[in-house]
Image: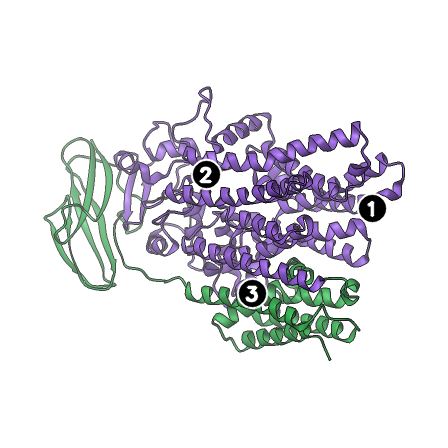
Amino acid sequence: MKSKRLSVDLAFLLPTILLSTCFGAFLSLQRVTDPFLYYDIAFVKSIQQETQMVIPETGPYASLSFVAGREILLTQFANMMGIGPKQLQFLPLGTVLLSSTLYFLALRLLKSPVVASLVTLYLTLNLSHATALYSVFGYALALPLFLGFVAISKEFFQRRGHFEIGILLLLFVAAHFIHYTITVWMVLFLTGASLTIGIQKWLTSNSYAVKAVPAYYLAIALGVFFLGLNETVYQSFLPLIHLETLDSAAQRFLTYLSIDPASINRSPYLYTRSSAIGLISACSLVIILLPIVLGVIQDIWQLIVRRSLRWATDSQLPMMWGITLMGIIDSVSYAFRGSISTKSFSMILPLVTLLYVQRTGKRTLYYSVALLLVMTSTVKLLVFYDNSYVIGPGNTNSNSDRIQPSAEWLQSHAPQPKFTMLADMNLYGKYLVASVGRGYEPILCGYTTERFENVIGASTEEWETVPDIVPVDLVSLEPTTGFVWVRLNPLANYLKELRNNHRLNLIYDDGAVWLCQPTGE
Amino acid sequence: MPSLDLVIVMSFTLLQMLLVLLDITGPIRAGSGFLFVSLWPGYSLLAAFCRRYRQNLMGLLEHLVLSVPTSLALNVVLGLALNNLNLSIRPDAHVLWMGFLTCALTLAAMVHPHTDHGNKRRYCLAFTGALTVALLLGVFAHSSRLSDTESYLSLYVLGADGQAVDYPIEVAAGTPVRITVGINYAGTSAEDLHLVSPTEDEIALRMQPGDEWEKNMELTLTQPGLHRVSWDLYRSGMNVPARSVQLWLKVY
């Protein structure tokens, strides 16, 4: 019986991984990537000939000191696979790592290989998070650790073992060096799940009725470790917290859903996605969150008001509340930094959604919701493709090879080895990778609305800082990404305005890229 | 008789060590390298230390899948720990210590008495699946190598000292300014071009692949005011410029 079940589980796992990998290969051919990944790739390229990894304290790679483990892992992948970092950037490794671990956790929680397969496909085919998950970006490498952490925690609450503690600590420490967000997720999940077990025990007069044991000490230890050793909190999180950021977070969230209230005084140059993209993203969020909201209300009613023994002894409740608490706090913490994050909602909360739907006992509804989730991802695929957003029928931006001639020209003709470059994050990343080992280094001067207006000649204000070079991707249909979640319209939409801007010389043109230089006025 | 899974782990670890030490690249190395980093170390660790595994309580699927995060974590933590000893990022050093560790853990698992996870057919299915995915990744990695050169045609303008700096901004009427204009061409066949310049008559050029052309030009503007000075490069028989650069000059 056990053997037959294993065959069924494997029979669903393998096609799920293969289908996810094929989609990852498609994204790879489309050259989909996260702009921040260029920093990792450039750094890995720069240390490949070295014997030791030393992250510089200043310059474009300084922030990588928070994620040293990620750089080690990327170097190890490139070296062991015998490929270059530029190739590694577009390999669908994340899809394989993620689909296997997510399938396993979903199978553990939902007990159905069909639903586990569907929830895995929902995430691996989901274009909203494709840039972060399909390749070797931080989330792709750290999320499998989180999924493994949750799976082992489930056992750990039931049965204490030295080995489980060891593995949980190993996963936590590794995640700490790969992506700080995932480390926070681990601490929040463990705290939330332990508190839920504590509440369950408190509500039942017979403490043996609840078999699980909370892991307060481990949660506190991990929390202290995180707050004591993770400098990101103090350098990148706390300084950004202001009350105004809450307002801008709300505005960005409404824009994400393609809702633009008339009262919002937005710059005309801020990027707005097609309303169809916003609509499908909003539908997907509603499908995920509605069952959770209703389920949590029911949980509270049953636990606190009715003191139901069934609820108080439910072994799935700590997992559900732990993950939900993690999602809510993650989202709120990002809101204080200026952008409501829906990452945890979309990536992890569908498991909780399905657990709540499963609890209703209606099998048709259970399978329908799982199928509906996959359908939102496939509809996204069509809508995104139709709008050339992330993927498209043609190139959505100039690939690294097309940037190479202008990068070489800059190397030969740049007045000094270090020069400031006002560029979109994606484009800057390509120049940064191209500059490795060539004796020059572009320094990013990120876009703000004011700088964007200066470039397209829509402002007569003086330059706040005059950049040495302003490259323009002539092909890009993607938003111009600037500092801290600033997303402006593609510069390629303003080529006529650029040409007529008498404060900008156009000094280089190769059909893929223009290099411009402010006249200094 | 050692269990089949541990024999497979040991064999593929040794294969990877050979591939790296002999510097053999290709789809097999890419696939094997992926498993070497993301599967084998964790698998051997779980096999060696997890008591539940030895008591046949950990299922094959659980063992195989939990090996993924465990392997990644082991590589990160040990990689950082050994970085100061110069052992982390050199391929030969990394493959040796991680290879020996994986083999040692696998041997440790072999000497402990334990039972298999079910029959050999399940092992074969699971490991064939993992190897197939790895091989597919390897083939994809090998076939999607980025090309270093593409055909392109570029037109540029340089300041007085031949650098992308100090372009003239203001100039007295009738005073000549020196500008350098250049063209780079990389393609598969020769191309006929003509450059329309504000300083002299149209320049006809025949560029061979890999050709670079540069010319110093002297520009004299007599009318006061703001001038847009542009150089347009046309492909043979085309009315729209293929490339165009421009400078703004204030003449007083």
Q: Nearer the viewer, mark 1 or mark 2?
A: 1
Q: CA distance from mark 1 to mark 2?
A: 47 Å
Q: Which chain is purple?
A: A
Give x and y (percent) for residue A63.
57, 47
Q: Which mark is residue B34?
A: 3
Report the front residue among A306 and B23. Answer: A306
Foreground of the two, A122 or A447? A122
Please check whether the numbered discs 1 and 2 fall on a single chain.
Answer: yes
Residue A456 x %, y % = 33, 34
Asked whether, in this view, residue B118 is left or right of residue A144, the answer is right
Residue shown at 71% from the left, 62% from the top? A1
Residue projecting furthest to the top: A263
Q: Amino acid at mark 2?
A: Gly
Colour approach in the figure: by chain
- Chain holding disc 3: B
Q: Which residue, given by chain and number where applicable, does mark 2 sit on?
A: A482
Whether residue B96 is visible here, answered yes or no, is yes
Tell me the element at label 1. Answer: loop
Snapshot quadrant of residue B153:
bottom left
**What chain letter is assigned to the residue under label 1?**
A
Q: CA distance from mark 2 to mark 3?
A: 34 Å
Residue position marked by numbered label 1 in the rendering = A213
Question: Can you tell which of label 2 and label 3 is closer to the viewer?
Answer: 3
Query: Where residue A259 appears, x then y in whole percent?
Result: 47, 27
Q: Residue furthest right?
A: A206
